[in-house]
Each structure stands twice: as C-alpha cells, then as structure tokens.
Image (cartoon, grey):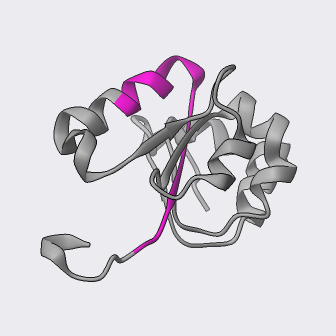
Amino acid sequence: GPYGRLPIIKNALIVTPSSLSATWGKEFQKWLGRERIGVYIVDQNNKVEQFKKTYEKPIMIISYEMFMRHAALIEDLKFGLIFCDEGHRLKNANIKTTNLLSDLSCHRRVILTGTPVQNDLK
C-alpha cells in the first residue's frame, strides 16, 4: 500500500493490445523496480494457470486476444482493479470482449484511451 500502509487492492488485471504487453511490464519495472511489485505477463511461455498459483506477482498483464482465449480461467479470479488500455476497442457493448470484461468480479475499473471524444464509454 501507499507509504507502508495496508494495500488498497490485492491484485490487478491490465488488458492491453498484444503489442503493448511487454511495454507495460517495462514501465512497471522502470517506475517501481523489480523489488517493489511483481508483474506477470501472460504470453506463450507464461500461462494464466501459473498466475493463479503465484502470489508474489499481484499484477497480471494480458493481451485482449489472450484474455478472450482464457476468459473462463480468469473469471474465477477476483481483481481489485482492472485497467483496459486502448479502451476504444470496447466502445461497442455488444462485443464479446466487453461483455466478458464486464462480468469479471472487480471493485475498480479504468479505461485508458487516447480518443475519448470519439467514444461513448457508458
């Protein structure tokens, strides 16, 4: 938690385009260092199942494509925070990705987008 207090959230999910997953991981390392917070990037080598077994890495970074493939495994997890990068991909409430993300158990949600004026982010 901030300044040594109890944590506000226990874990977080970051959903991002596949081209940005590694960048998110590098930014965590750049700003917080490896010793302050562990980041788990889901890819071909790191599976969702492994994240469920590890407790030292409370942040899961996953691409939209991998999220869609593993949504059934992820829905069992409870997240304190969900970040959706490039949120303009979610502007249609009828697409499967939006519905699956909405169904996840979570207390706080953040959508990041560079084009908020063009989007209806209900």
Residue at image position (73%, 31%) is: 66
Residue farthest toward the left in the current orientation of the protein? 3
Residue farthest toward the bottom in the current orientation of the protein? 6
Please report the bounds of the magenta region as a residue range: 9-25
Residue at image position (39%, 35%) is: 114
Give the quarter of the figure containing the C terminus.
bottom right
Q: Is residue 13 magenta?
A: yes
State the image quarter where residue 42 is shown. Answer: top right
Q: Is residue 53 magenta?
A: no
- The picture places residue 103, in percent across and down from the top left corner, at 78, 65
Q: Nearer the viewer, residue 75 or 84?
A: 75
Q: Is residue 32 above or below residue 78?
A: above
Q: Nearer the viewer, residue 103 or 77?
A: 77
Q: Nearer the viewer, residue 87 or 20?
A: 20
Query: Left or right: where does residue 108 sit relative to residue 65?
Result: left
Give the quarter of the figure containing the N terminus.
bottom left
- The picture places residue 67, in percent across and down from the top left corner, at 73, 39
Q: Is residue 113 above or below residue 111?
A: above
Callout count: 0
Query: Left or right: where does residue 90 sit relative to residue 37?
Result: right
Residue at image position (69%, 71%) is: 105
Residue at image position (66%, 54%) is: 53
- The picture places residue 36, in percent across and down from the top left corner, at 24, 52
| Residue 95 appears in the rendering | no
Query: Left or right: where does residue 100 sit relative to residue 52?
Result: right
Query: Left or right: where does residue 93 sit relative to residue 111?
Result: right
Q: Is residue 90 above or below residue 78?
A: above
Q: Is residue 38 above or below residue 77?
A: above
- The picture places residue 37, in percent across and down from the top left corner, at 32, 51
| Residue 71 appears in the rendering | yes
